Image (spheres, rainbow, N blue to C red):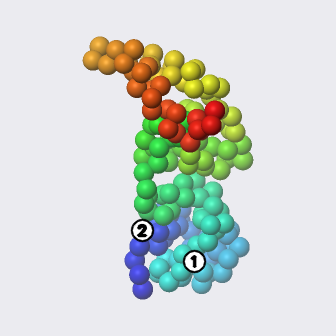
Amino acid sequence: MTTNPTTIMIKDLRERAGMTQEALAERLMVTRQAVSRWETGETVPNVDTLKLLSKQFDVSINTILGSPRKLTCQCCGMPMEEDSILSREPDGAINEEYCQWCYTDGAFTYPTMESLIDYLSTHFSSEQWPEAAARAYYAKALPKLAHWQGT
């Protein structure tokens, strides 16, 4: 029996939701034994089941996996350390690529990199970090993010 973050998280999420293994199995259309095997570390859910678990418990797949990697918004570069910051698809599914401020319900908030740079440099500059310095930083950092690659 192996203990890993995924097994601990699935059991914890299920128990916090007040669900039995049988109830979770019914919702996911798997056997109770499958849920038991995930929780003991005997097996791990496949990608499709991870997506269903994510939707069932309203958490990111990253959370289910025990947060093995740090997420960064691929539009603005903001660290996304809590699931509440993650964006949503039109069907309500969590999107781990973008923060809720850059991408909501299938649409991007900032149509161009320049519009995002304008917003960020205006709102995140300070006396210690003048707007021109902020603008230069974002102009250099944003093109490295996946959303702006090839635009």
Q: If the image is split into quadrants, where does the C terminus sit?
A: top right
Tell me residue 45's x, y (percent).
58, 73
**Circle 1 crowding by C-alpha within 10 Å: few under 14, some 14–19, many from 20:** many
**Image vertical order of residue 40 relative to residue 107, above or below:** below
Q: Is residue 120 left or right of residue 101?
A: left
Q: Residue at x 27, y 17 (%)?
A: 128
Residue hosting label 1: 35
Q: Earlier in the sequence, mark 1 or mark 2?
A: 2
Tell me the kind of residue under disc 1. Val
Q: Is residue 130 left or right of residue 108?
A: left
Residue hosting label 2: 5
Task: Place residue 141 in its image quadrant.
Answer: top left
Q: Is residue 69 visible?
A: yes
Q: Is residue 45 left or right of residue 72?
A: right
Query: Among all residues in the image, which is located at the extreme left?
Result: 128
Q: Residue at x 71, y 73 (%)?
A: 29
Task: Place residue 23 in its image quadrant.
Answer: bottom right
Q: Residue at x 48, y 58 (%)?
A: 63
Tell me residue 27's x, y (percent).
68, 68
Task: Place residue 61 in its image quadrant.
Answer: bottom right
Q: Secondary structure at mark 2?
A: helix
Tell me the kind of residue under disc 2. Pro
In 3D space, how far apart are the residues under numbered discs 1 and 2 (Cα atoms)?
Answer: 15 Å
Q: If the image is split into quadrants, where does the N terminus sit?
A: bottom left
Q: Is residue 76 visible?
A: no
